Image (cartoon, helix red, strand yellow):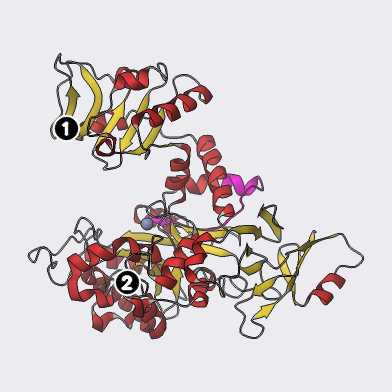
Amino acid sequence: MKNLVLFNGVIHTLDTQKPTASAIGMRGNEIVFVGGDKEALALFNNEPCERVDLKGATVIPGLTDAHLHFEYYSMMLQTINAELPAAKDVVAKVAEKARSLPEGKWITGFGWNHNEWGGEFPNAAMLDEVSPRHPVSLQAKSGHAIWVNSAALREVGITDDTPDPEGGHIVRDAAGKATGIILEEAMWMVDRKIPAPTVEELAAAIENGLQTANRHGLTGVHDLDQPSVFKAFQRLHKEGKLTLRVNKGIPLAYLDAAVAAGLYTGFGDDMLHLGPVKMFADGALGPRTAWMLAGYDSAPEDLGISTTDVEVLCESTLKANSNGLAVAIHAIGDRANREVLNIFAEAKKQYPHSGLRNRIEHVQLLAPEDLGRLAELGVIASMQPLHATSDMYIADKHWGNRVTGAYALKTQLQKGAVLALGSDCPVETLDPLTGIHAAVTRRRSDGTPCPEGWRPEQRLTVEEAVRGYTQGPAYACGMEDRLGTIKEGYLADLTILEKDIFAIDPMDILKTEVVGTVVNGKFVWRSEAI
Ligand SMILES: [Zn+2]
């Protein structure tokens, strides 16, 4: 078993009995000492031990992202980021990719916007020059167009004579030749021909995703993606390559299978275990599909959408909870949140001793009378600080005065709810420091909207935000007795930062480097600074 001692640091333990220290000693995957340098350096005297001088770096418990989509994120990392200043920059990236991929493999990407390139659509010929034998499909940032090459057109069988499908359009030039731009419903003709990744390809993508997450200081995630990524995680875990603790949620579609197989939330080990069953009560704010008690300020007739029948949500929740499975329900609008709270109240009444930690994902808008109900019912508030700063302008526009109950992180804490913070990556970046910054300042990275931030009464202290990324997620998956705090007997997960984020100007949190990440007492990321 390997021993590790970190000394000469600024350590914020989040343990109220011993909030600060300068050294930590770890045996294997466990923290065995928290205190001063002298004692720490005397530990493990007759045993092999690595001793690392932190040179004043700051240590906090390992950060966990309580809501993300790891497969989607990892696959995005493999594709081309086409959000570039000119079409020729994208072509150069495609050329680079074509050189490294076997012939015939698809090259995919996302993010181009021809309006930023002077308004002209790009075309297939530009891609053909650098990628004659790899089919290429690049989605526009708007999500309403794709840019393909001739190999892709051939592969999916689109010719100059292919008729436009209903609701879609294959753009053609004056001579009637398909240009390589495919719009709206015609995009499916291409998308459905792009093969899904194999387990091996997915595992390789996930491995790369793990490294990126570790470099950003993450030691754990709660994944709410599809089961395919579960296989990849298990495979990596078996090979000893899983460097993030994973709490793996499953979609509602698998509830019956999970019950039939006798699976409980928590099944697995401390590294990889089954999380909650994920369901959806409504849509999102942007497209006005969040389900509302009253119409949108911007569209008074519009109440949004209930995406899963309330009865189905209720029955499924009761079925899950009576079979040892916790539930996580996506709820954005105040009506969606109210219905979900009613369902969780019923579940609590029927199964008061289940010990399961049900959660609401997002908790974006609550009616004033519902603000205290998560705390009352013991429901976890799984919230994303970056959604507040991304959405602030449309939230004001669509919800008007109701925004006093929107993205109300501080209110949830004050009422006594457990906050589990996350990113919803790839919707937002998974970098947890940008999330902590947003929670503490309620400002975007460019400082907008103003020095006090948007709805400043909802700002968290740095300590509250860090608890939301450490102790909150640990509690949400029932591991608060061994994870989320730097304390003797706890699992040795740590995030090491170049600067003390508890002491610096909160805007500088964005510029703080992660110099080390420790999972189970081992460095999974270590920069040259330590
Ligand atoms: Zn999500």
Is residue 195 visible in the rendered image? The answer is no
Residue 229 x/y as whole percent: 48, 46
How many numbered marks have been drawn onto this rendered protein structure?
2
Residue 215 x/y as whole percent: 58, 53
Most distant residue in the right direction: 46
The residue segment tinted magenta is: 234-251
Q: Which residue position holds label 1?
A: 168
Query: Residue placed at 83% from the left, 76% from the top?
Result: 39
- Position of the N terminus by quadrant: bottom right
Judge depth for marks 1 and 2 and give the one in front: 2
Per the model, the C-alpha gap separating discs 1 and 2 is 40 Å
Q: Which residue position holds label 2?
A: 454
Query: Residue placed at 28% from the left, 27% from the top?
Result: 122
Query: Residue placed at 45% from the left, 80% from the top?
Result: 353
In-front residue for pair 107/332: 107
Q: Is residue 166 left or right of residue 348?
A: left
Q: Would you say residue 63 sits in the magenta stretch? A: no
- The three-letter code of the residue at mark 2 reads Trp
Secondary structure of the residue carrying tag 2 is loop
Ligand 1 within 8 Å, label 2 CB:
no
Most distant residue in the top direction: 175
Is residue 23 visible in the rendered image? The answer is yes
- Position of the C terminus by quadrant: bottom right
- The three-letter code of the residue at mark 1 reads Gly
- Compared to residue 387, the image places residue 153 above or below, namely above
Most distant residue in the left direction: 301
Identify the image quadrant of residue 287.
Answer: bottom left
